[in-house]
């Protein structure tokens, strides 16, 4: 009597049988695919000619190239049984050229220029009697008025800390950046002078260009003796001339509203309040949240200053859009109108749910700048407001102001800059 196989032996025999079956099926599949491939290639010389596949054996010297792309109809993709039928459904894109571009989906249609953002077709105007209160954001106005009551603290801040900070920043910019002037990057210099004239800002502002891959710009002025604007080189490459002037005007808005002084004062008060025993921590956190909201409102005020100089909302929104997701390689294909529609969609979606409202509230407490879509929407509303229209109607022609200035001699800012350049 033969001994019956044990359980491990049975398992081993079953695995060997399965491996043999799998190998046999794999052999049959390879043989079938090889036969089908040979039949397809022999009966389809047009395909070989179409893709320039080398006929000789061995490895090709170069990869196969395609002179023009082809498209497959859905019916041809579904049918796999007949090679001639597949070839008959190949449609070369060059065989039937069309002069009309493909029609986009309704969701992504681009509206004509001018249907969303207001533009000013007439020449630019200047605002000879412009004050910061004429364009400040309401929240920025309220916070500034509260701090203006602390006049002794403001005086000490300007005369004490302001002197040291301005001198340190001046030396740093002078040693690590390129200063713009009449003979150094004159286009940027002329944009600065025009923006100063429009905003009625009589300050000897210097612009410095620093090498930095992150597109950014910032300003600082505590005493007002050495105000400056720093622009990163990557920002200049990303923006057009009009957009770069809008960036300069945004920074001039900070100087016009003296945000450097008041925000510094608010931060110092917050630090002092947080050191108080007992309620200091809670009081400091509450003040910090208020300061962050004020910082965001200050940015909205400066966006308005940017609009007053550009006098075209599309230019300012384009700056926000490029700083959000732009690059020099495809900036010409970006559309500020589409970005504004995105901002409107965010406004509707965020206000229609508790999640959206809570997200906006949380971001308002930690971000120093408003969300880009929020800034675009706020600027759009201000550009359509009666207050902005009244400012434009009360302005004077910029070209006439230039001629009057040329007839009366050069201003102090231009004279000082040219003297530095000659020296």
Image: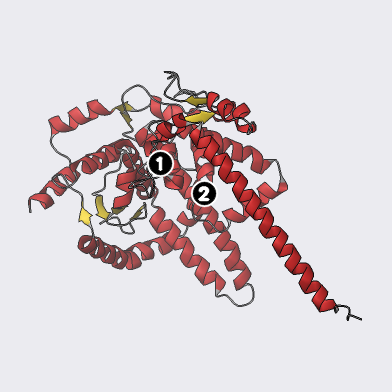
Which residue is found at the position 65% from the left and 54% from the top?
26
Q: Are marks 2 and 1 in contact (CB under 8 Å)?
A: no
The circle drawn on residue 370 is 2
**Residue 311 image position (x, y, % from top left):** 38, 31
User: How packed is label 1: few (under 14 Cα within 10 Å), some, or many (20 or more)?
Assistant: many
Which is nearer the eye, 179 or 194?
Answer: 179
**Residue 180 image position (x, y, % from top left):** 20, 49
Residue 18 occupies quadrant:
bottom right
Q: CA distance from mark 2 to mark 1?
A: 14 Å
Going by the picture, which residue comes out furthest to the left?
A: 423
Quadrant assignment for the C terminus:
bottom left
Quadrant assignment for the N terminus:
bottom right
Residue of label 1? 319
**Residue 302 image position (x, y, % from top left):** 42, 44
Foreground mark, 2 or 1, reads 1
Decide if residue 245 is on the left or right side of residue 175: right
First in residue order: circle 2 vs circle 1: 1
**Residue 104 image position (x, y, % from top left):** 53, 26
Compared with residue 134, is residue 265 higher up or lower down, i.e. above or below?
A: below
Which residue is found at the position 56% from the left and 27% from the top?
84
Label 2 secondary element: loop
Decide if residue 241 is on the left or right side of residue 74: left
The circle drawn on residue 121 is none
Decide if residue 241 is on the left or right side of residue 141: left
Which residue is found at the position 47% from the left and 44% from the top?
300
Label 1 secondary element: helix
């Amino acid at each position: 009597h033969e001994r019956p196989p044990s359980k491990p032996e049975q398992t081993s025999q079953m695995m060997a049988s399965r491996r043999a079956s799998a190998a046999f099926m794999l052999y049959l599949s390879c043989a079938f695919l090889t036969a089908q491939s040979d039949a397809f290639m022999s009966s389809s010389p047009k395909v070989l000619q179409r893709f320039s596949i080398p006929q000789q054996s061995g490895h090709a010297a170069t990869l196969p190239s395609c002179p023009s792309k082809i498209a497959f109809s859905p019916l041809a993709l579904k049918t796999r049984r007949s090679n001639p039928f597949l070839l008959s459904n190949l449609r070369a894109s060059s065989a039937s050229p069309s002069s009309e571009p493909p029609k986009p989906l309704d969701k992504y249609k681009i509206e004509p220029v001018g249907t969303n953002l207001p533009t000013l077709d007439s020449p630019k105007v200047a605002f000879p009697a412009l004050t910061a209160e004429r364009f400040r954001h309401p929240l920025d106005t309220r916070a500034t008025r509260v701090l203006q009551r602390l006049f002794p603290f403001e005086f000490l801040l300007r005369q004490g800390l302001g002197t040291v900070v301005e001198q340190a920043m001046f030396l740093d910019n002078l040693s690590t950046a390129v200063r713009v002037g009449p003979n150094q990057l004159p286009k940027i210099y002329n944009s600065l002078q025009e923006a100063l004239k429009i905003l009625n800002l009589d300050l000897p502002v210097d612009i410095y260009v620093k090498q930095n891959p992150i597109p950014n710009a910032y300003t600082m002025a505590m005493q007002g003796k050495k105000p400056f604007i720093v622009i990163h080189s990557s920002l200049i490459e990303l923006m057009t001339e009009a957009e770069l002037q809008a960036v300069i005007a945004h920074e001039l808005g900070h100087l016009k509203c003296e945000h450097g002084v008041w925000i510094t004062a608010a931060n110092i008060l917050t630090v002092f309040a947080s050191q108080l025993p007992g309620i200091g921590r809670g009081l400091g956190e509450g003040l910090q949240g208020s300061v962050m909201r004020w910082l965001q409102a200050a940015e909205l005020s400066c966006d308005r200053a940017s609009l007053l100089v550009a006098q075209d909302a599309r230019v300012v929104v384009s700056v926000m859009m490029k700083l959000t997701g732009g690059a020099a390689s495809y900036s010409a294909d970006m559309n500020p109108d589409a970005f504004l529609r995105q901002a409107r969609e965010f406004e509707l979606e965020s206000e229609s749910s508790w999640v959206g409202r809570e997200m906006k509230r949380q971001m308002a407490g930690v971000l120093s700048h408003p969300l880009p879509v929020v800034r675009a929407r706020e600027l759009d509303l201000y550009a359509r407001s009666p207050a902005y229209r009244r400012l434009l109607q009360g302005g004077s022609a910029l070209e006439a102001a230039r001629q009057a200035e040329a007839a009366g001699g050069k201003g102090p800012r231009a004279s000082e800059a040219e003297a530095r350049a000659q020296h």
